[in-house]
Amino acid sequence: MPERLVPLVAQLASSKFGQGLPPGAWALDDHGQPMALPFFSTPVRAGFPSPAEDHQEDRLDLNSHLVRHPEATYYLRAKGNSMTGAGIQDGDLLMVDRAIEAKPGMIVVAAVDNEFTVKVLEATSDGLCLAPANPDFPKIILKDAQELTLWGVVINVIHPVLPRG
Amino acid sequence: MNTRVVALVDCNNFYASCERVFNPALRGKPLVVLSNNDGCVVARSQEAKALGIKMAQPWFQCQHLVKPHGLIAMSSNYALYADMSRRVMSILAGFTPDQEVYSIDESFLAFTDKPGANHQQLGLKIREKVLNWTGLPVCVGFAPTKTLAKLANHWAKTRIEFSGACDYAALPADQRLALLKATPVNEVWGVGRRLTEKLVEMGIHSVADLQAADPAWLGRRFSVVLERTVEELRGVSCLELEDVAPPKKQIMTSRSFGWPVTELSELREAMAAYTTRAAEKLWAEGQLAGEVHVFIRTSPFKQDAPQYSAALRLRLPEPTDDTLRLVKASRFLLRQLYRPGFEYQKAGILLSELQPATLRQGQLFDTTDTSRRDKLMTVMDRLNREMGRDTLFLAGSGIDRAWRMRQGNRSPRYTTHWAEIPVAVA
């Protein structure tokens, strides 16, 4: 502590505020006994500002890069192998945007028979149908009683290449 | 001065609709969402309303509808509803900078009223965008005042001819009068059950009757609130849009137990958990509590069992948001309240005398190290928010939690937990 501050601190410490403080900074009183000192928590700024401060930019952010409509973007998990030809493997993460109007050729999530399915939307002479991207799987052509509800358009697939763990 | 038009956007059957967005199997079926602990109905699909199920009806009274009508009951999934609400409110904010989020599923919007503007068209556009982006149906009511916008919203929701959007000012005079006459006075915003009874005694049955009454006289007879309501019904705007919800005056956390609780030790664990939850809310609001109230009671539905219900209040030496201190206080009160020999069904804590944390009396030489304690509580609060509830909790909350509430049929948290996102068959 700078010497010129000692009288001030001593005066503060001997006032009623100086009582019952936790141990921490301490000094000796007039009788050579340790006494509590007030602790001020105001931070003191030191050093020069960084010369790079004015050039600081936000780090690249995948969310802002990939998500076009945050309020309309949802994530679903693909399960199965019917879309491997379109780069969607079993277990991949699908980024689905409900704000985009589904058009033939797009990969969509649709509700069929009470479950979600991911397929390529195709236009046929009879209307829309859902086509797999794997020759081992059949097209979903809707029968009379079946109802097709388009749920959203897949805009990205996230496929991990390094196994977890 | 530009005149202003107010819109009220309200999600239809919000909780039930949220469940349906992510579970196509629920579409077109009678569906109810149950309160915490699966006690009573808090949301109903249109099909469930058609079965005669009432709001807040205890679930055990509806169970007989499961077999014959295929009624489905879901436990409430607040993580999902909160996220879907956030999406809806954010989409609505895109239509105007002047927004008041009124509740989890309602928002007021204000627009400058341009001559010849077609508000019904705008309402349909809002409806379409929210439906496309979230899968949630909404209704929109436009009017010169908030109270009338609420009314127009009610008509948009209940009358199919409006297709979900109704502009009060654009209604032809005869149609408007017919609607006002056909709508009972209790549909008016702020007119509750008891007030309705008194108004009906005076011969005021419909909204048209209330609109025709003398606001000043009603103000003297009842309250200035009712006077304002009548002015608003007459198109005189008295209520402004509030940008920020006013800070809460009280914070309450109470739950029903999964089964009857008899032991003080179990009650104490539950109370510590509720107090922690209440303290989290206090933190989120940036407030300090000056008083702690605690109550416990037996089940009023079990008339044959001995009944007990009691509450106590404690004034804190100084306002605090410190979970540890609040738990101490609630535990003290609980010890005074507890009587053995009863089957307790519900307990709760209420924090009152709230004040902003920034007003905390500065104690320059405070003996407790509040900064360290603040840090501990912040870490606890953040961990619980980010890693899921109860990652970290006070040991007094108990590790077993036998009293934990029943949530038999909660849907996955589709939008807030990676492990629970929906599956699409590929």
Image (cartoon, rainbow, N blue to C red):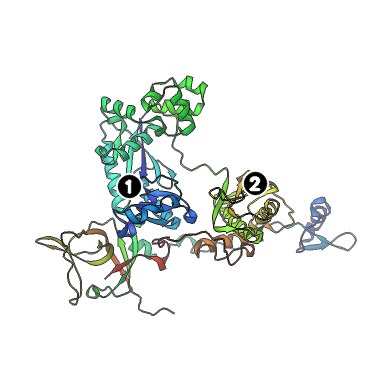
Residue type (three-letter) at the residue carrying disc 1:
Gln
Cα distance in 3D space between marks 2 and 1: 39 Å
Residues packed near mark 2 inside 10 Å, few (<14), some (14 to 19) or many (20 plus): some
Tell me the number on the disc at residue B46.
Answer: 1
The residue pinned by badge 2 equals B311
Seen in the image, is B181 located left or right of residue A49?
A: left
Residue B169 point in image, percent of width and height = 30, 30
Question: Camera-side residue: B125 or A38?
Answer: B125
> Hey, which quadrant is residue B163 in on the image?
top left
Residue A28 point in image, percent of width and height = 84, 62
Residue B151 point in image, percent of width and height = 36, 34
Mark 2, chain letter?
B
Residue beneath the point at 32% across and 47% down: B46
Residue beneath the point at 24% across and 59% down: A150
Residue type (three-letter) at the residue carrying disc 2:
Ala
Q: Is residue B396 above or below residue B305?
A: below
